Image (cartoon, rainbow, N blue to C red):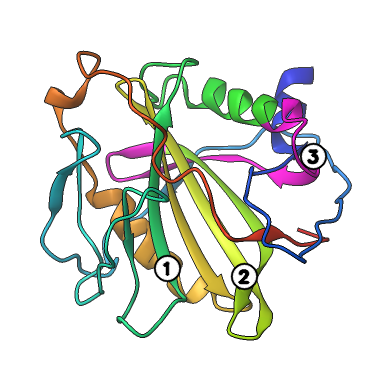
Amino acid sequence: MGSVMKLLHVCGVVCLVVTAGLLAGCGRSQRDPSPPRLRTVNVDGLPERGDPIGPLDQQRIEVAPPKGWYVPSQTSQWIIRFTPSEQMTYPSIIVRAEDYQGLANVSRANVDEFAEQVAEAFENDKSATKRSVAIAPIEIGRFVGVSYRRRGKAPYGLKEILVERLLLDTVVAGRKYTIELQTRDGELESYEPYLFAVAAGMHFLETGSADKSRQPEAGSESELTEKDGA
């Protein structure tokens, strides 16, 4: 029971590169008395997607952007990224990946175990500020994983702005994939369906399974720094 209760609200942090001059604070952990239920997202009515892009991540996946969204050039910070237009930084949907040892594949049968592993990873991360993280199992079409929300600050021109973040994690063939939505403060719910559409449309290729050699993490860094009260 203790491991289930610890799952809901754990003190953790997403490891981020802190932009010079930005400060991070601490949030207090709160624990709910009941275990989280699997949230099933109705994929009917989600925004349309464009043509799939890939194979990506050493031929492991194909990812389709929301229809009409811009695809910036790839960098070492992510596998792929989408924005509504070339001129817009936010909202942004980012896909990252890294090798994962905890589970080979996440499914409905073991998603609670994966959620506990994610919670424990946050708790054990000694490299950055601790924050309250609400982790919940989620199913979006064929995508099964966990979701959690963060808040942060990011440079925007000559100032900093508040950024809201919704992250989806899953594991397929030993790779943990994170699909992240970043928006300006107050806009997260408006763009959440676009994140769900991308997750529902991800195609994991059988050829990209365990026979692929290990590669460096794709996009484990960000310019965001987390904000107090997340």
Q: Amino acid at mark 1?
A: Ser
Residue 2 seen: yes
Q: For numbered disc 1, what is the local secondary structure?
A: strand
Magenta region: which residues?
A: 122-144
Q: Nearer the viewer, residue 218 or 189?
A: 218
Q: Amino acid at mark 3?
A: Asp
Q: Position of residue 41 (x, y in %)?
A: 40, 52
Q: Is residue 29 above or below residue 68?
A: above
Q: Which mark is residue 184?
A: none
Q: CA distance from mark 2 to mark 3?
A: 26 Å
Please state the horizontal and vertical placement of residue 225, each as a whole percent of the image: 69, 59
Between disc 2 and disc 1, whose residue precedes?
1
Number of the front mark, 1 or 3: 1
Residue 21 position within the rendered picture, expressed as x and y whole percent measured from the top left = 77, 66
Cα separation between marks 2 and 1: 11 Å
Q: Quadrant of the N terminus?
A: top right
Q: How much space separates mark 1 and mark 3, taking CA atoms?
A: 31 Å
Is 169 magenta? The answer is no
* Residue marked by disc 3: 32
